Image (spheres, helix red, strand yellow):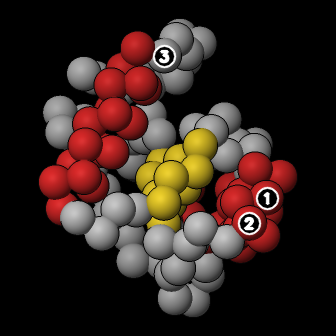
Amino acid sequence: LTNPLKRTVNGEDALTYLRDPANDKPCMILLDLNMPKMNGTEFLGVAKGDSSLREIPVIVLTTSSEERDIVASFRQSVAGYIVKPVDYSKFLDVVRTIQSYWSLSQFPSYRPQCVA
């Protein structure tokens, strides 16, 4: 990956990081639904309700293939929902595909661009 990667372990930590003016806003968020303290669905509810965060594209990358999780995520305006493959090489293919798609996507000039 050529884009900077910041990992947080739960939704609360992610919100703290994203709201800190000392930190650059990411060009996208890869979100796991299965997190402690504040899960991904709860995180989405808060992030998409926050005017300073709502425009950051969120891609759910999780182990859940449950229809209710997919529907709940899209109701919170996610940009995509991908079930994590178990196989490492397939996982790398998924990450490359995400990076390729977002590096080609056009954003308003005030948004950080994803780099290929």
Q: Is residue 72 above or below residue 113?
A: below
Residue indicated by mark 3: 105
Q: Residue at x 25, y 52 (%)?
A: 90
Q: Position of residue 12 (x, y in %)?
A: 56, 76
Q: Is residue 38 left or right of residue 71?
A: left
Label 1 to label 2: alpha-carbon separation: 6 Å
Q: Nearer the viewer, mark 1 or mark 2?
A: 2
Q: Nearer the viewer, mark 3 or mark 1?
A: 1
Q: Secondary structure at mark 1?
A: helix
Q: How many marks?
A: 3
Q: Residue at x 24, y 21 (%)?
A: 116
Q: Is residue 63 above or below residue 61?
A: below
Residue indicated by mark 2: 67
Disc 2 and disc 3 in contact, CB within 8 angstroms: no
Q: Position of residue 110 (x, y in %)?
A: 55, 17
Q: Secondary structure at mark 2?
A: helix
Disc 1 and disc 2 in contact, CB within 8 angstroms: yes
In the rendered image, is residue 49 in sight? no
Nearest to N terminus: mark 2 or mark 3: 2
Q: Residue at x 40, y 49 (%)?
A: 22
Three-letter code, disc 3: Ser
Q: Position of residue 94 (x, y in %)?
A: 33, 45
